[in-house]
Amino acid sequence: QLKGIAVISRRPKFIISLVALACALSSFPARAAALWKVVSVEERMMVDATVEITAGKISGKGGCNSYSAPAKFVRGMTEIGPVVATKMACDQLESEQAFFLALERARAFRVEGSNMTLFDAGGKPLILLSR
């Protein structure tokens, strides 16, 4: 029996790592993983902005520039940022900057049908997305 315990005791880090990986993958909401069109940011309409959500990051177009950011989506909670973007100028730069700041302030999300809403820490809607 001691031999069996010794064999098991050599692998606990590996087993714990597998369990942690399985939990991380299962907590990423499959229904959120998609390419979303940004409908509005703080109730202002957005044009040509997208959010693509994959495990561990988001990326897309902000209206003028391409961007990406590390992101976590777990059980209705989210953490996004910092957002890194290209630096092209355009007429939509002000609304794009508001979008990037809103992404970084997002702390919760809700998916309902073909829409997803990102909320700030106080529960105020920040960004409305649609598939």
Image (tube, rainbow, N blue to C red):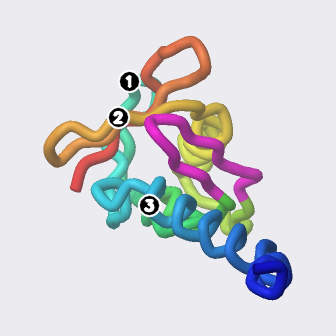
| Closer to us: 76 or 27 | 27
Question: Which label sits in the foreground, 3 or 2?
Answer: 3
Residue for point 23% across, 42% down: 115
- Most frequent secondary structure within the magenta stretch: strand
Q: Quadrant of the C terminus?
A: bottom left
First in residue order: circle 3 vs circle 1: 3
| Closer to us: 23 or 77 | 23
Magenta-highlighted residues? 71-83
Residue 43's mark? 1
Residue 100's mark? none
Element under disc 3? helix
Q: Is residue 67 visible?
A: no
Where does residue 122 sit, x and y in percent of width and height?
A: 57, 12
Three-letter code for the amino acid on which mark 1 is drawn: Glu
**Up/down of 43 relative to 127, above or below:** above
**Up/down of 124 relative to 88, above or below:** above
**Up/down of 130 relative to 106, above or below:** below
* Picture quadrant where residue 12 is located: bottom right
* Picture quadrant where residue 17 is located: bottom right
Residue for point 44% across, 60% down: 26
Residue 26's mark? 3
Find out whether residue 119 is within the magenta segment.
no
Element under disc 1? loop
Q: Quadrant of the N terminus?
A: bottom right
Where does residue 6 sit, x and y in percent of width and height?
A: 85, 82
